Image: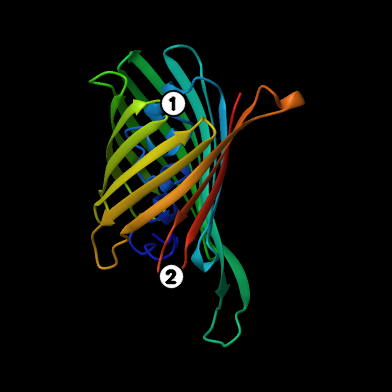
């Protein structure tokens, strides 16, 4: 699951949107659509914003092979008992050599990549049903060309069998970009089972609608003493170069001190083993 934003850039524009954001979901195998219980829901299923009990801010940094760096920022809060709002920013960048002629030395080194700021709203008409929508602008820098576009995500989250089980569906990146190429439109569906507050099992099916291959994701999270979490996951995909394998991660919770005593910090780390080099993610989430 090495997340190089250029390996698939010939199939769609804004390939950085294929890189799943956040650390906690990735450590659970990339299964989060049916859980979506923190501000990371902005990138997976915006309907999950209704699960926020406090305001949340999250920042994530991804370190992968090929000097490709992925970042994600998100903020969410409830407006009232039936509505929630969130803002997000997702991006990925790297630097490449630029040549105007077939020379040994490059003319210059340029930054390529892109970013997408988003605005999300969620609505919960019934206690067992919520829906969310995200609108986002897309800016992609390719060599000396800049592409602009707009897209939206739509998510649904239901609890048909009580609070322990949730089902989620999310349609992502439905829109257009001025290059005329397609965006990486994607359909996710997921389920979560949470027998206790400290334990959860999750599973997702990911279906690219434009380019790519279906994948299946499984994961689990176990908290010990509301202080340390251990997460494991596994993903299976198809194609010529399938990204199958185990993911893992940990989480740490800590309450702030003195002037920060009303802020609860959560630090998450995820590792995705890959034959070409491990992918590491770190994130900090704050509840206040």
> Mark 1 = which residue?
49
* Residue visible at 42% across and 53% down in the picture: 14
Q: Secondary structure at mark 2?
A: loop
State left or right for residue 14 relative to residue 77: left
Mark 2 vs mark 1, CA separation in Å:
36 Å
Q: Mark 1 or mark 2, which is nearer the start of the sequence?
A: 1
* Residue visible at 37% across and 26% down in the picture: 196
Callout 2: 10 Å neighbours few (<14), some, many (20+)? few
Image quadrant in which the C terminus is located: top right
**Visible in this render: residue 281?**
yes
Residue placed most toward the observer, 19 or 51: 51
Up-down relation of residue 148 to residue 288 (above or below):
below
In the rendered image, residue 210, in percent from the top left (x then y), is placed at 27, 52
* Residue visible at 39% across and 47% down in the picture: 232
> Mark 2 = which residue?
276
Q: Secondary structure at mark 1?
A: helix
């Amino acid at each position: 699951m090495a997340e190089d934003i250029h390996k698939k850039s010939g199939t769609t524009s804004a390939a950085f949107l294929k890189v799943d954001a956040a650390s906690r979901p990735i450590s659970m195998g990339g299964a989060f659509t049916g859980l979506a219980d923190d501000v990371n829901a902005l990138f997976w299923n915006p309907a999950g914003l209704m699960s926020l009990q406090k305001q949340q801010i999250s920042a994530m940094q991804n370190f992968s092979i090929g000097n490709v760096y992925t970042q994600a920022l998100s903020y969410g809060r409830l407006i009232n008992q039936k509505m929630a709002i969130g803002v997000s920013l997702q991006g990925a960048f790297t630097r490449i050599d630029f040549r105007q002629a077939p020379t040994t030395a490059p003319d210059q080194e340029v930054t390529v990549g892109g970013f997408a700021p988003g605005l999300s709203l969620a609505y919960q008409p019934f206690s067992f049903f919520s829906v969310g929508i995200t609108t986002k602008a897309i800016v992609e820098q390719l060599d000396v060309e800049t592409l602009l576009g707009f897209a939206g995500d739509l998510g649904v989250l239901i609890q048909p069998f009580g609070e322990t089980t949730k089902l989620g569906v999310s349609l992502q990146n439905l829109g257009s970009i001025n290059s005329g190429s397609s965006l990486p439109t994607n359909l996710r569906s997921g389920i979560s089972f949470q027998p206790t507050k400290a334990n959860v099992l999750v599973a997702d099916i990911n279906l690219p609608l434009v380019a790519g291959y279906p994948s299946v994701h499984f994961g689990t999270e176990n908290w010990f003493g509301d202080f340390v979490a251990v997460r494991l996951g596994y993903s299976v995909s198809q194609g010529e170069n399938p990204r199958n394998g185990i993911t893992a991660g940990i989480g740490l919770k800590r309450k702030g001190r003195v002037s920060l005593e009303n802020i609860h910090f959560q630090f998450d780390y995820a590792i995705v083993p890959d034959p070409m080099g491990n992918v590491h993610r770190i994130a900090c989430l704050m509840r206040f």
